[in-house]
Image (cartoon, rainbow, N blue to C red):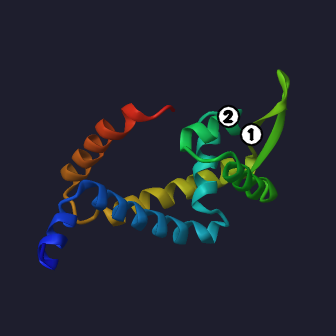
Amino acid sequence: MSEHASKAVRHASPGWLIQRLSRRFEAEMEADLAPHGVTLGQFALLMASLEAEGLTQTDLGTIFAMPAWKISRHLDGLEASGLVIRQPDPASRRTHRIVPTEAARALAPALRGVGQAVNARLLAPLAPGDRDRLVALLQQVVVPGERF
């Protein structure tokens, strides 16, 4: 297979294209979140804890398919920044519930704005209807396989 043909196959691969776009989103989110003192992993956990207060670390691991050690590290950073607290679960001595603080609630609109800005910037080459269609198609493929 020629180099040109190989490149054409790669550029027609949904997996390769989605992976490349994902890396762009990740890089831009990291850069845009940095001034707020939050990493992308922390952002994800914080937004989930704001959506459903009192999730456990296990719940968060399930939602994001993230190993427990990584969840713990991200939560350590959020806790050190005063954005979440770990509250003991009255039903289990080993479980903690993740509760966002008032500081997290105050920061949330700016963080949501970062996500919206990155999405708009990276999808700017598409017409608005095409953006909506892309999201709808991705939802059809991704959401049924999720456990959140």
Q: What residue is drawn where x is 25% and y is 52%?
A: 131
Q: Is residue 60 left or right of residue 79?
A: left
Q: Residues within 10 Å of mark 2 (few under 14, many from 20)?
A: some
Residue 102 placement (x, y as % from top left): 74, 47
Q: Is residue 88 above or below residue 14?
A: above
Residue 7 placement (x, y as % from top left): 18, 72
Residue 72 placement (x, y as % from top left): 73, 50
Residue 33, picture quadrant: bottom right
The answer for how far apart the CA atoms under marks 1 and 2 are is 6 Å
Q: Is residue 7 left or right of residue 27?
A: left
Give the structural element (helix, strand or loop) at label 1: strand
Q: Are marks 1 and 2 in contact (CB under 8 Å)?
A: yes
Q: What residue is drawn where x is 71% and y is 32%?
A: 54
Residue 30 placement (x, y as % from top left): 54, 67
Q: Which residue is mark 2?
A: 53
Q: Is residue 17 left or right of residue 78?
A: left
**Amino acid found under the numbered disc labelled 2:** Glu
Q: Is residue 55 or residue 144 the one in the foreground?
A: 144
- Residue 99: which numbered mark, if any? 1
